[in-house]
Every structure is written in C-alpha cells, then in structure tokens.
Image: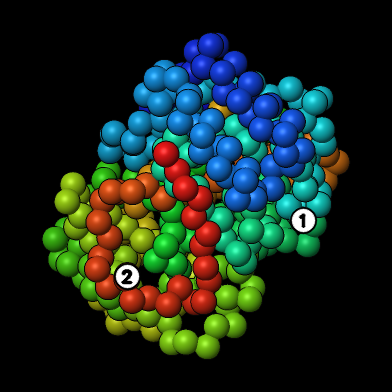
C-alpha cells in the first residue's frame, strides 16, 4: 500500500469509467491537452456534469494531515509511452491523463497556469531532466528536493496541489509535512508571523528572477480562521539576512516539519492532493536512468474560491511580474 495510514479516497469503477469517457471525448474533439479557451469551456461543462461520487471524493481536505490520495484511476504503462526526457519534449504525452487531471481540478476549484512555466500549460509533466539533477525544481533527481510550499514566492499561488502518478517503478517517495502537526512555542510562532524575509522565485522561473522590483518581506506563519498556516521555501529564502532569533525560530520550524514528515510513494493511477497552505512537500533523491522508465508525475495547481484567508498584505505584492492564468471552474 503506497500511502500507509494517510487519508485515501477511492474512486469506484463507475466513476473511473465516467471520468475517462469525459476525457476521451474532449481529447477526440481537440486532439491536444494544451488548453485553449474552447477546451477550458468544454472541460468546465464536462466537470459540472460529473456524478456525485466523484464530487464527494474531490471535497476539500478535511483532516490535519492536509492532504489525501485519490485512488483508482487507470494508467496503461505501454499506452502511456516512455517517460519524456524533459517537460519541454513531453508535448501531448499521455494527453488523456492531462484532461482527466484537469477535470478533477475543475471539480475542486479553478485550475491555474503560469505564463512563465512549461509554456503556460495547465497540467505539467514532472520528470527528471539531464543537466538539472542538482536543482531545487521538479526536474532534479540526485538531490533532496527540500520541503516547500508550491510557488511560495507568489501571492497567487495555488490553494491545492495535485500530483498524479504515471510511472514510479522505483517507488520514489514524495515527502509531505503538515504545519498543523508541529509543536512550536508561542514565542517562535510570534517571531515567524512577522514579515521579515522575502521568498525569491525558484529556478523554474528564470525570467522572473530578473524582475527589478524590491522583493517583499512575507510572514512564514500566520493564524487563519481555522488554525496555523504557512508559506515556506527555505531553498529560496535568504535566511542570512535575518536576526539570530528569527533564524533560530525558523530552524526549529524546519526541524519540526522534518519530525512530522511522511513519505508517499505513489503508484500509477494515484493522485496526491495537498493543501498548499498547510503542507510542505518535497522528494527524496534518486538516480535517474534517462531510459524512458523514470518516475513521471502530472501536476496541476488549483485555486479554491472561498478558501481560508491569507494575509491581507499579499494583495499588494508584485509577484515578481509573474502572471497566473485562471481557468473558470464550476
């Protein structure tokens, strides 16, 4: 079992068939999973027509784990084809699964795409790429991908992150840790709720890193209506600029997240759904073969209307000039 005691939401056979047929119809019409206004409109209509069983399993995250695994989708390994050599060469590889993930994302909220990442696609291919082994991005392999909030640098980041498994023959684990499970003293929480340091754009956004505006300082933690929430990316946070008290509190948070971290080794057809305000995620190191059999995930990002409130100051952040395109969900 790939997820241990983590929350699992199984899709029954009828729901799996319903979702696949909807995706196949859309793919037959558009012959691509690259989003256009017409395709997004068709996806929204098809998602609205999906049955109550699918909608129930796609309900909001409802435990302090801050995540769940949606299980039951089918992936034919031979039909999917080789793991792409990089996202740039993936194109429409296993396109029907892109549309399945986009349909599920639209049931959950409004899918988003970043103009500066993976050619503006709403579904990304996460595969190891030659020459990127040491980076802190999804294209890396030989280093620990540090636990982080997805797109933490941006105020318009996703509320939900979806990782759908296409291939994982080596049982490579995604790591996940919920801020709701850490133990921190009141003084540390108060320290980390202060906007002291910026979070800089990661290496997946090369043009954004050249943005000329001053980087805004943001809080690492804040109290939302239903509990503690975080915005965390130590690999892109200039901690050396902070005072010792802040660095010490940050280190204790990092240690606590490591203590409560769980590993999720996804199998083909499983989709990990993460609340991006509660859970930091990463990945263990592995040795890529680049032979068409490496780990292959599909990633979608979702904004949820009415999701818990983030700090009001985020409304005036410049986002380093990066723009997210939001699809119209149901």
As drawn, the label of residue 314 is 2
Residue 21 seen anywhere in this rendered image of the structure: yes
* Residue at screen point 42% across, 77% down: 318
Q: Residues within 10 Å of mark 1 (few under 14, many from 20)?
A: few
* Residue at screen point 35% across, 31% down: 59
Residue 316 horizontal/vertical position (percent): 33, 76
Q: Which residue in the rendered view is the most extreme toward the top? A: 13
Q: Which residue is mark 1?
A: 88
Front residue of 45 and 54: 45
Q: Quadrant of residue 72?
A: top right
* Residue at screen point 72% across, 61% down: 132
SS class, disc 2: helix
Front residue of 116 and 67: 116
Q: Quadrant of residue 74?
A: top right
The number of numbered badges drawn on the structure is 2
* Residue at screen point 37% across, 80% down: 216
Side of 38 where 45 appears, left or right: left
Q: Quadrant of residue 116?
A: bottom right
Q: Residues within 10 Å of mark 2 (few under 14, many from 20)?
A: some
């Amino acid at each position: 079992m790939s997820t241990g005691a983590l929350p699992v939401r199984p899709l029954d056979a009828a729901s799996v068939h319903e979702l696949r047929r909807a995706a196949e119809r859309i793919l037959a019409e558009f012959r691509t999973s690259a989003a256009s206004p017409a395709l997004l409109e068709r996806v929204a209509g098809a998602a609205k027509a999906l049955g109550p069983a699918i909608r129930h399993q796609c309900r909001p995250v409802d435990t302090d784990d801050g995540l769940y695994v949606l299980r039951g989708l089918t992936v034919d390994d031979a039909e999917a084809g080789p793991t792409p050599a990089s996202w740039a060469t993936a194109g429409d590889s296993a396109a029907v699964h892109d549309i399945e993930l986009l349909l599920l994302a639209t049931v959950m909220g409004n899918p988003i795409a970043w103009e500066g990442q993976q050619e503006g696609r709403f579904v990304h291919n996460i595969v190891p790429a030659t020459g990127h082994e040491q980076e802190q991005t999804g294209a890396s392999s030989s280093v620990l991908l540090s636990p982080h909030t997805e797109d933490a640098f941006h105020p318009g980041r996703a509320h939900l992150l979806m990782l759908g498994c296409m291939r994982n023959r080596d049982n490579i684990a995604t790591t996940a840790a919920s801020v709701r499970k850490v133990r921190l003293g009141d003084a540390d929480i108060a320290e980390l709720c202060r906007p002291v340091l910026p979070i800089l754009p990661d290496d997946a956004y090369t043009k954004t890193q050249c943005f000329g505006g001053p980087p805004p300082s943001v809080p690492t933690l804040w109290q939302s209506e239903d509990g503690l929430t975080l915005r965390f990316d130590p690999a892109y946070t200039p901690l050396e600029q902070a005072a010792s008290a802040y660095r010490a509190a940050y280190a204790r948070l990092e240690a606590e997240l490591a203590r409560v971290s769980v590993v999720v080794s996804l199998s083909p057809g499983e989709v990990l759904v993460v609340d991006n305000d509660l859970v930091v995620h990463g990945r263990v190191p592995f040795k890529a073969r680049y032979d068409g059999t490496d780990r292959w995930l599909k990633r979608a990002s979702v904004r949820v209307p009415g999701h818990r409130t983030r700090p009001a100051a985020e409304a005036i952040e410049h986002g380093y000039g990066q723009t997210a395109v939001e699809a119209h969900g149901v």
